[in-house]
Image: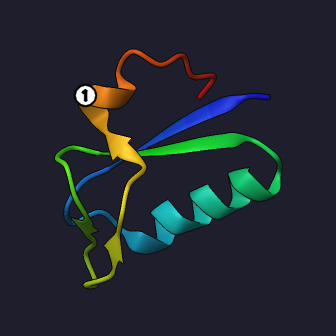
């Protein structure tokens, strides 16, 4: 199964982030979301997304995309 890393930062566009996460997960890919800091990410329109892990934690993983 292909593995995809989607980094998230405060102020990101929630529509772009959630659309990619949803599309890739529906297609059967393993999707890992990673925030720049621990804890929730507050998107540009006020939506909050809780990443799976921090970017530092995800750094050692192997990703196809």
Estimate the x, y position of residue 58 in percent, counting from the top left: 38, 28
Residue toward you, 10 or 34: 34
- Few, some or many residues within 10 Å of mark 1 (<14, 14–19, 20+): few
Instruction: Please give left or right for residue 26 compared with residue 62 in the image.
Output: right
Residue toward you, 52 or 18: 52
Estimate the x, y position of residue 63 in percent, counting from the top left: 57, 22
Instruction: Please give left or right for residue 4 compared with residue 45 in the image.
Output: right
Check the picture and name the quadrant holding the C terminus: top right
Mark 1 residue element:
helix
Instruction: Please give left or right for residue 59 compared with residue 22 in the image.
Output: left
- 18, above or below 53, in the image: below
Image-quadrant location for residue 54 = top left
Query: Which residue corresponds to the image point at 31% horizontal and 29% vertical from the top-left?
Result: 57
Q: Which residue carries the number 1 mark?
A: 56
Check the picture and name the quadrant holding the N terminus: top right
Query: Which residue corresponds to the image point at 42% horizontal and 49% vertical from the top-left?
Result: 52
Extreme residue in the bottom direction: 46
Query: Which residue corresponds to the image point at 59% horizontal and 35% vertical from the top-left?
Result: 4
Image-quadrant location for residue 51 = bottom left
Snapshot colouring: rainbow
- 42, above or below 47, in the image: above
- 53, above or below 13, in the image: above
Estimate the x, y position of residue 45 in percent, counting from the top left: 28, 84
Residue toward you, 38 or 47: 38
Q: How many labels does the image show?
A: 1
Image-quadrant location for residue 12 = bottom left
């Amino acid at each position: 199964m292909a593995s995809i890393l989607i980094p998230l930062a405060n102020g990101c566009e929630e529509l772009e982030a959630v659309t990619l996460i949803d599309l890739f997960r529906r297609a059967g890919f393993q999707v890992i979301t990673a925030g720049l800091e621990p804890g929730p990410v507050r998107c540009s329109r006020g939506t909050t997304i809780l990443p799976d892990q921090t970017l530092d934690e995800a750094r050692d993983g192997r990703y196809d995309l």
